[in-house]
């Protein structure tokens, strides 16, 4: 479903601030894979997501989605088959538009644009059915401005908007990090449920190691622009935070350091 081949990208090349953000990344995700991504600050996690989404172009390398080369395809065209939820609940939605208007905009993301009303009675009924799955009462607030929602409600809406067209790839970029523990737990459960329901091929960046262990069928660890650890299936299920930290020290010869890591 997703294939990245020999991807490298350097920021501020040939300057004192030069940084190799990604170094010869090779990564393949099969259809339905749910891969969690961990790593210290500056490991290249967000850069990886930005290259997949088309927000950044690699210096060298290829990106294939469903066997189609997309490395030259701009972000707005990739959005037809890539869903993304960001860390900031304010991103990914339009606060000045209503819930139903935001949903209509997301619903037409992968469809040919036509000059007709975005919110029809048929779509309104469908939107209510989707919103019911969130158990947040948003199905009764279709005309409410999204800017009036809480952070957790808005992130739940963003997740729904990113997934209900069943994108080929779902990118989750620390999408629970800005929420309080209760809301983060809610969004984590919703994530598990929606990915499982639609069988979405998913890549999720997180600083929460326990979350990375609990979700998905595969885990990769990044450091200094490289994938240094890749584990799946039963081996992943047997991992603990302590084992993850031990693996990092074994591979890199130093302790895992991150001022944002959540260890449990």
Image: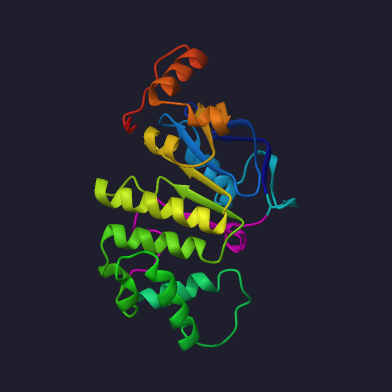
Asked which quadrant contains residue 75, the reply is: bottom right
Percent x, y of residue 250: 49, 13
Percent x, y of residue 107: 52, 72
Above or below, 228 against 108 in this view is above
Camera-side residue of 195 and 257 = 195
Above or below, 8 against 177 in this view is above
Q: Residue at x 58, y 45 (%)?
A: 51
161 sits to left or right of 235 = left
Asked which quadrant contains residue 95, the reply is: bottom left
Can residue 141 be seen here? The reply is: no
Q: Residue at x 31, y 49 (%)?
A: 184
Q: Residue at x 44, y 70 (%)?
A: 130
Above or below, 70 against 163 in this view is above
The colour style of the image is: rainbow
Residue 176: within the magenta?
A: no
Percent x, y of residue 38: 45, 33
- How many marks the image carries: the answer is 0
Camera-side residue of 160 and 217 = 217
Q: Residue at x 38, y 64 (%)?
A: 157
Majority secondary structure in the magenta region: loop
Percent x, y of residue 7: 65, 36
Residue 83: within the magenta?
A: yes
Can residue 44 be seen here? The reply is: yes
Quarter of the image that includes the C terminus: top left
Span of residues in magenta = 73-95
110 sits to left or right of 259 = right
């Amino acid at each position: 479903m997703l294939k990245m081949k020999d991807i490298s990208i350097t920021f501020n090349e040939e300057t004192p601030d030069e940084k190799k953000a990604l170094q010869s990344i090779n990564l393949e995700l099969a259809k339905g894979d749910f891969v969690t991504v961990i790593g210290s600050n500056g490991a290249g996690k967000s850069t990886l997501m930005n290259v997949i989404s088309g927000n950044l172009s690699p210096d060298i390398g290829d990106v294939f989605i469903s066997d189609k080369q997309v490395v030259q395809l701009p972000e707005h065209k990739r959005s037809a088959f890539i869903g993304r939820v960001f860390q900031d609940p304010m991103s990914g939605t339009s606060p000045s538009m209503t819930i139903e208007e935001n949903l209509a905009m997301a619903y037409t993301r992968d469809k040919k644009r036509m000059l007709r009303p975005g919110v029809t009675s048929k779509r309104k009924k469908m939107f209510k059915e989707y919103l019911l799955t969130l158990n947040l009462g948003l199905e009764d607030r279709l005309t409410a401005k999204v800017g009036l929602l809480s952070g957790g409600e808005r992130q739940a809406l963003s997740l729904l908007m990113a997934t209900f067209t069943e994108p080929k790839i779902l990118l989750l970029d620390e999408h629970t990090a800005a929420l309080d523990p209760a809301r983060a737990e809610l969004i984590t459960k919703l994530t598990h449920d929606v990915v499982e329901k639609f069988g979405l091929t998913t890549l999720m960046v997180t600083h929460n190691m326990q979350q990375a262990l609990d979700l998905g069928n595969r885990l990769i660890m990044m450091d200094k622009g490289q994938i240094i650890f890749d584990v799946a299936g039963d081996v992943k299920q047997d991992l603990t935070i302590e084992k993850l930290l031990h693996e990092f020290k074994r591979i890199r010869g130093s302790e895992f350091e991150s001022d944002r890591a959540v260890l449990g």
